[in-house]
Each structure stands twice: as structure tokens, then as C-alpha cells.
Amino acid sequence: MLSVPYFGPAIAFAVLARSLTATELEIPRSVPGDMGHYYLLEWKRTGDVVRALTKRVGASTIDYSLTETNCKTMRMREIGVSDDGSDKIHGPPTRWFDLVAGSSKSDTAHFLCD
């Protein structure tokens, strides 16, 4: 089952309705400049940790990433990546790392946890 982060009643309902009817939810960016678009494909929250499958659509590439974000510490680790499809994600997992403000990973973490 999908977990929906809390954005307030009206927005949470809209996000839930969208997640049930669409397979991709665009992740808003906090700073301009990255020509890619980021999409949340799947997510599940267990305690403080959110596991998320995301897709980046760039000018000439599409990349997939599976991450875990600890919403309490706001640290993340990458479980695996692929440019051949979400079913081809491979590791090894990274160590937990601090997020850089304005980065796509930071924007994803805040989208999932705030």
C-alpha cells in the first residue's frame, strides 16, 4: 500500500487521489537550472524511513533510482540505480548521506517527509 506524506487535508487528498489514478507524481524543484524532471513512481513509509522509486527524465536520458530517506534525521541512501528501466535497478547501496539543499535528492526527501 502506498503511504502519503502529510501536506494538510486538501492537498493530502489530492495527492492520494492522484497516486491512485496515476503512476507518476512530479516532484517540485526548489531551485531552477536542472533541465530534468523528477517523478515519484512508488513509495512506502515504515516508521521514519521512506523507500521511494523515482524517475528522472532528462534531455536525452531517463534514469531510475531507489532510495531510502530517514525523515527524522533527513539523511538518505541510494539502494540502486538504472538507466535501463525500474526493473533493472542494481546496487550496491550507498552509505547514509547528508542532503545538499537545492539538490534533487534534497527536494525528493522534503517532498516525501514534510
Image: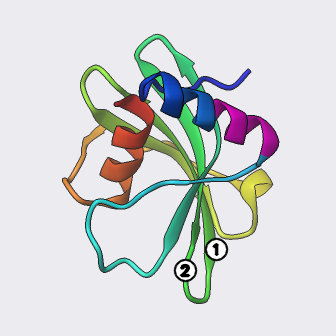
Callout 2 secondary element: loop
* Labels in figure, total: 2
Q: Position of residue 77 (x, y in %)?
A: 40, 40
* Highlighted magenta segment, given as a residue range: 16-21
The crowd level at tag 2 (other Cα within 10 Å; few <14, some 14-19, many 20+) is: few
Q: Tell me if 43 is positioned left or right of 6 in this view.
A: right
| Residue at position x 80%, y 42% in the image | 21
| Residue at position x 36%, y 61% in the image | 29
Q: Position of residue 45 (x, y in %)?
A: 54, 21
Tell me the kind of residue under disc 1.
Ile
Whether residue 21 is visible here, answered yes or no, is yes
For the C terminus, give its image quadrant: top left
Whether residue 95 is visible here, answered yes or no, is no
Q: How is the image coloured?
A: rainbow
The crowd level at tag 1 (other Cα within 10 Å; few <14, some 14-19, many 20+) is: some
For the N terminus, give its image quadrant: top right
Tell me the kind of residue under disc 2.
Gly
| Residue at position x 60%, y 36% in the image | 14
Between 98 and 21, the one lying in front of the other is 21
Q: Which residue is mark 2?
A: 58
Q: Are marks 2 and 1 in contact (CB under 8 Å)?
A: yes
Callout 1 secondary element: strand
Between 68 and 34, the one lying in front of the other is 34
Q: Position of residue 18 (x, y in %)?
A: 69, 41
Q: Position of residue 96 (x, y in %)?
A: 32, 36
Q: Which residue is mark 1?
A: 62
Between 22 and 63, the one lying in front of the other is 22
Q: Is residue 83 above or below residue 29?
A: below
- Magenta-colored segment: predominant secondary structure: helix
